[in-house]
Amino acid sequence: MTNDLVQAVSILAAALSVGFGALGPALAEGRAVAAAMEAIARQPEAAGTLSRTLFVGLAMIETTAIYALVVALLVLFANPFV
Amino acid sequence: MSIDWWALGLQAINALVLVWILARYLFRPVSAIIAERKDAAQAELRRAAQAMEKAEAAKSAADAERAAFARELSDLQDKAQYEAEEIKRQMRLSAEQEAAQIRQDAAKAVDQMQKDARHQMGEEAATLAVQIARKLLTRLPQEAQVSEFSTGLAEALAALPDATRSRIGAKGPVAVRAPRALTPEETAKLRGDISGALERDVQVAITVDPSLIAGFELDAQTAKVRNHLAADLMQIKEELVRHA
Amino acid sequence: MENPLITQPLFYVGPVPITSAVLVTWGIMACLTGFSVWMSGRLRTTPDGLQSAVELLVDTIDGQIRDTMNRDPEPYRALIGTIFVFVLISNWSSLIPGIEPPTAHLETDAALALIVFVATVIYGVQAQGVKDYLAGFADPSWVMIPLNIVEQITRTFSLIVRLFGNVMSGVFVIGIVLSLAGLFLPIPLMALDLLTGAVQAYIFAVLATVFIGSAVEGGHATAKPATKEPTQ
């Protein structure tokens, strides 16, 4: 019974973790892409440098979501309380 | 959640070995060959720069030579022009001089011709005048042709120096020319006048010469004493011609 | 669904369990070694296409190191370059069917991050001496010593988790999609995986360069405009 409850809570926690963990990076990536677009529109000749920097920055931001995913996976597959 | 420590160790060793292998066989040779090529390119560039420098030097030398040639040429041209101008100037100068000379000569010749013409005209005029006078004088009276001239002859004789005077009539009679045959009185008077002038008694040999017009001409070996109109006319004519 | 956090050893060599990650790493090492030896034998001063590509790679790595550290890249080229090449090929090895990239396992990432950590310490000590390197932890004041030490550990940890999470999530997502619809649908995700793999390899290498650079520069690293140290 307790084990089932822990498993249910773990799944809920994993879902919440991924959901909320994806929220912040999504907003941040949107802002970053918008800023990059504006910059490219203003300076098309710098598009190469800007897009390279943008990809690196997006990967960095995405890492936050990945952390959340890792936590969710830990909760799901390597839960120390199960 | 469990970490496979064996796998961690193996992967760490693997990664280190890979680092060593790639450093040994990939990165070091590749960067060496890049550096080598860079050096070669640098050397090539340096050589090219040297070649260019040499070419520039040759070009500037050629330029200098050309400039020297041009300078020489322009010098020669200047010189030739100068010489030509000099020659021209000299030619003009000499031509001017020649022209001036010719002009001067011409002026002189014209002068001379004018003078000659004037002289000739004067001479002709004088000759004419003398001829007129002679024609007129031939109409003088017979006495007048002789009468007073013996006195003038005596005066002229008296004016002569003593040495000359003493020689006149020393050897025979004194030769006197008269315009006509003299009467005995006239001859006596002439003789008397001459003897008076010479302060000694001399003989007189009369020769007739109508060209004298009037007067006498005493003709000694050393001196001629003229006192007649022909001589006067000659003198007048000479005077006229000289002053023409 | 298979647990992505746990790998079963395929076989044992004596007492040592050999997992698929180690096996694939050996394969990658064999390929890279063979290529390198073959390549080093045919290096010419007038390069062909392949040699030009390799030279471009080396030159780019040199340029990145020089830009980030403002130093001669010679002592760091092998480490940074190997990390980049190995992570890139590991990430892209998922394209071959049946092969799981070694970087999708925590042990490989941890090993790489540990190597970077140790290299940071070694290069820092080598450049500044033990005393100055340790004094660098007390910068700007001794209060910061625990924070600096924690930062050293957390940034290594974040290096591990970033690479592991990205690659593993890519493999995991593709696995899930494959179990739902086997044909065509995973292709865009695989393309995304390729991009992520390349970007993560680049990030891992750049972060390693930044860490080493800051250790080598000591307290002056903050004055460098080119060095940016991410907070994660």
Image (cartoon, grey):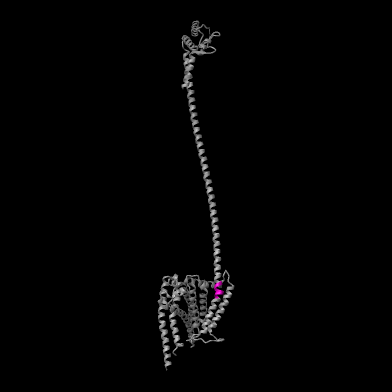
Image coordinates of residue C208 in percent, x first then y, are 48, 76
Rendered view: B49 above or below A75: above
Residue B26, magenta (yes or no):
yes
Magenta stretch: dominant secondary structure: helix
Image coordinates of residue B185 in percent, x first then y, are 49, 5
Image coordinates of residue A23 in percent, x first then y, are 40, 81
Q: Which residues are magenta?
A: B22-29
Query: Quick check: B33 left or right of A22?
Result: right
Rendered view: B63 above or below C127: above
Residue B125 seen: no
Q: Considering depth in this image, is B202 or B228 the residue closer to the camera? A: B202
Q: Considering depth in this image, is A58 or C120 the residue closer to the camera? A: C120
Residue sticking out furthest to the right: C41
Residue at 54%, 59% (x, y): give it.
B52
Q: Considering depth in this image, is B113 or B60 the residue closer to the camera? A: B60
Residue B224, magenta (yes or no):
no
